[in-house]
Amino acid sequence: MAATAPTAPPLTWSRRHLTGIEPLSAEEARLLLAKARGYHEVSTRRAVPLCKDLHGKVVVNLFYEDSTRTRASFRLAASRLSADVLDMSASGSSVSKGETLIDTARNIEAMGVDTIVCRHSQSGAAQQLAEHVACAVVNAGDGQHEHPTQALLDAFTIAQRLDRLDTFDLTGLRVAIVGDIAHSRVARSNLHLLTKLGAGVVLVGPPTLVPGALARLPGVDVTVAHDLDAVLPEVDVINMLRVQFERIAGPAFPSQREYTALYGLTARRMQRARPGLVVMHPGPMNRGLEIESAVADGPNAVILQQVANGLAIRMAALALVTQP
Amino acid sequence: MAATAPTAPPLTWSRRHLTGIEPLSAEEARLLLAKARGYHEVSTRRAVPLCKDLHGKVVVNLFYEDSTRTRASFRLAASRLSADVLDMSASGSSVSKGETLIDTARNIEAMGVDTIVCRHSQSGAAQQLAEHVACAVVNAGDGQHEHPTQALLDAFTIAQRLDRLDTFDLTGLRVAIVGDIAHSRVARSNLHLLTKLGAGVVLVGPPTLVPGALARLPGVDVTVAHDLDAVLPEVDVINMLRVQFERIAGPAFPSQREYTALYGLTARRMQRARPGLVVMHPGPMNRGLEIESAVADGPNAVILQQVANGLAIRMAALALVTQP
Amino acid sequence: MAATAPTAPPLTWSRRHLTGIEPLSAEEARLLLAKARGYHEVSTRRAVPLCKDLHGKVVVNLFYEDSTRTRASFRLAASRLSADVLDMSASGSSVSKGETLIDTARNIEAMGVDTIVCRHSQSGAAQQLAEHVACAVVNAGDGQHEHPTQALLDAFTIAQRLDRLDTFDLTGLRVAIVGDIAHSRVARSNLHLLTKLGAGVVLVGPPTLVPGALARLPGVDVTVAHDLDAVLPEVDVINMLRVQFERIAGPAFPSQREYTALYGLTARRMQRARPGLVVMHPGPMNRGLEIESAVADGPNAVILQQVANGLAIRMAALALVTQP
């Protein structure tokens, strides 16, 4: 670490919830990332004795949408902190009996649960929960709104790869986010976090899928582009969003082949990129569609590091919001 | 606590199973409630170090019906006692391969499991299990028969609200249970437990859903009524059963609106009640059908306390039946 | 144990994976069985303090096919070793999003998982995983290929019943495996393990379901028969495979009644057997189809002991492959 950190983190984290990146100050985001840096060794070395920071605490994974990696990552993060974790999913729950989200959450809270990790198809679900329960809430993805821990692990991975783990200051970096920006909570959270940390962002995709309004957000260094080949030589990092198969059939996506031709990250296209380009993907990948296997498995890709860092990020988020 | 408890609990609990309230003596029921009182602090304070009463024991949640709260409550209760808990459900199990309930349970037992918590759509399933396995069995709801831990947490909550936690003696209290009594295991278990503890019970609902035969049970203070407005001023506690949507279409339920008009607990109807009326609901609630939100969230409701007390009750049940 | 063991086990176990019985040497199989013998007491006594051999390790149950007992057995085995266990199933996973098995496994590995227990409908899936991840892989059944821990627990149970736990040398024993041999991974793994341990095997079933080619495997004492009544007096052990209902309708199975008449293990047929015949079944049983209840619950059956021994076998497999 630098002898004098350029930004002194606040002494204490005072937020009860992590519902999104947008409400965080840059300092709060850096505090979260620094906390994850501290857990990074714990999460990968898994030394005995285990970390006991949430010993005796109870975390519930309340998932209304399917997810392998996010659910597993939160579960392992909570376990690594010695918390007790309980998985709840929409199938096999009161949801099918017509109970409201708020009633379900209040019931979970009444069982002595400390923290609810919530994934929901409705934008704003996490915030709504946070307003109605006294326990902590962490947003694990809500509709097309935000997915804050994904953005945090992405930023952590960029900082790790480009040697900026000491300050998490991403000033001077240019990051392309490519794909269906309009419907992506990952894109939204990344946009907020990367600009808070000083990076510039360029959103790339077909005009139908990249709302121009995003480029007119006040006080934010963001531009919109539709030609990936023109953008590629200019950026330090590229984040390839997953193509949602269920949306391909619509007018926005004429065909898979055309999408790949225009916006797929192929080995051939990589020749236009800077040598050290950092290639990211939030997973699960559609190999051969938005990314070619040679790129996904190549030296520029940090896709598995993203997954690994997700554990440290989620440990940090859970530890900070769960009150002692 | 009183200087001299009116009923001395038996020194030891000798039952291997908790299949229902009906087979319990009043003393056994009080012992269970007193054990829960002891766990109440553990379940809510969650002090470190954790309670180790079932350390090294294995509890299996064998659920053949969906349930959020009961399954989660048993799971958290077992974890709070430091037991290892394993969830098994009908989907993803040998059940779909045609294995009998008894064979499934014997196999679970052979894996070194100490206690099976069973929910099943068939009345008598828990008792059948108890007769065929050597490990302990706790009934988490069997068909239209019993749901003993629900009745115990209801009684605990009444005693807590009305300051009778020292003896769990409910003598002099009058409790209304409202709704589809005929098909409700919650109603049956409550009827048995409340009368064992000294309370009088009035069963309220449409004639098609409240069998008059229940009012002729020998030695039990129970009456049947069909006019909620007439009953309301006379009772200290009201337990609003959940309307089962799947039964609404039948001849017993002409319409939701009519049900609410006759048997829904509305704010307007609450004006007829005693000021301190204790309002209960086993959940999940159909807001606006059997209970109005103003009542469910009002000062008389103890619905979330029921959920919270469920943890202590299930800790007590698991601790008592699981042999050391 | 004998004063001098006939076969000295190798000092260390060097395999990173357990993908099948076929690749194991007889010595390796005996080492695994001996390790299980050591855990047997731990798995059944469950003394406090618990065994900490995998404390801090993470095991993932990656199941692409339904299974009650195998999943539960692995889970309990991992817990008994103090590992952290995470269940993942095909429903609710990235699988439905089109991700490849290898990508899913690499992601799981990136989360710091030490060992993946995999069940998959495709033969060779476990081996494929083992070639692409650095963490350990245990095959919990892959298509019609192998189910190594089932064969190991079967051999352990035979050795236990016939007093050969000291060496696991099954020389001189004759074991019949009865049923749909052609499609059974249990039969394949048993065939390999039993012959490695010195036993002779006879495969019994309708000609359509018992490939004659198996009887011509080089260096292996295996024969094929179609008349169970003729085989029964000659064998020490009989392993009744489960009839797969989904295959009954085909030309191989004219009817359930005919199957039972020819290949069901009935009380009447048992009169032809040696008095001490060891009766096995991998479960779940179709009572009245491949085995009659009087036999399944009779003194010759070791079916529940198989289940109980499965815990020790899976503890041994997990402990040996998971690196310290």
Image: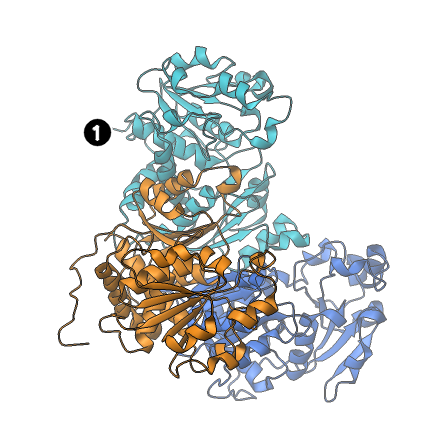
Chain colours: A orange, B cyan, C blue
Give the residue type at disc 1. Answer: Ala
Q: Is A92 left, or right, of A148 in this rendering?
A: right
Q: What element carries label 1?
A: loop
Q: Residue at x 27, y 62 (%)?
A: A196
Q: Is C316 left, or right, of B211 in this rendering?
A: left
Task: Give percent across and percent down for residue A20.
Answer: 33, 54
Which residue, as the protein is rendered here, is positioned at the far left? A4
Task: Give percent across and percent down for residue C290.
Answer: 76, 60
State the count of labels.
1
Q: Residue at x 44, y 28 (%)?
A: B193
**Which chain hosts label 1?**
B
Toward which corner of the image does residue A128 lie, by quadrant? Answer: top left
Task: Give percent across and percent down for residue C295.
Answer: 72, 58
In the rendered view, tell whether residue B81 sits above or below residue A43: above
The quadrant the N terminus of chain B occupies is top left
Q: Residue at x 30, y 25 (%)?
A: B162
Toward which corner of the image does residue C255 lie, by quadrant? Answer: bottom right
- Read off the residue under disc 1: B3
Which residue, as the protein is rendered here, is positioned at the far top? B230
Could one spot residue C198 in this view of the protein? no
Q: Which of A122 and A262 is in front in this view?
A: A262
Could one spot residue C168 in this view of the protein? yes
Q: Is C88 left, or right, of C200 in this rendering?
A: left
Task: Give percent across and percent down for residue A292.
Answer: 53, 76
In the rendered view, tell whether residue B275 sits above or below residue C226: above
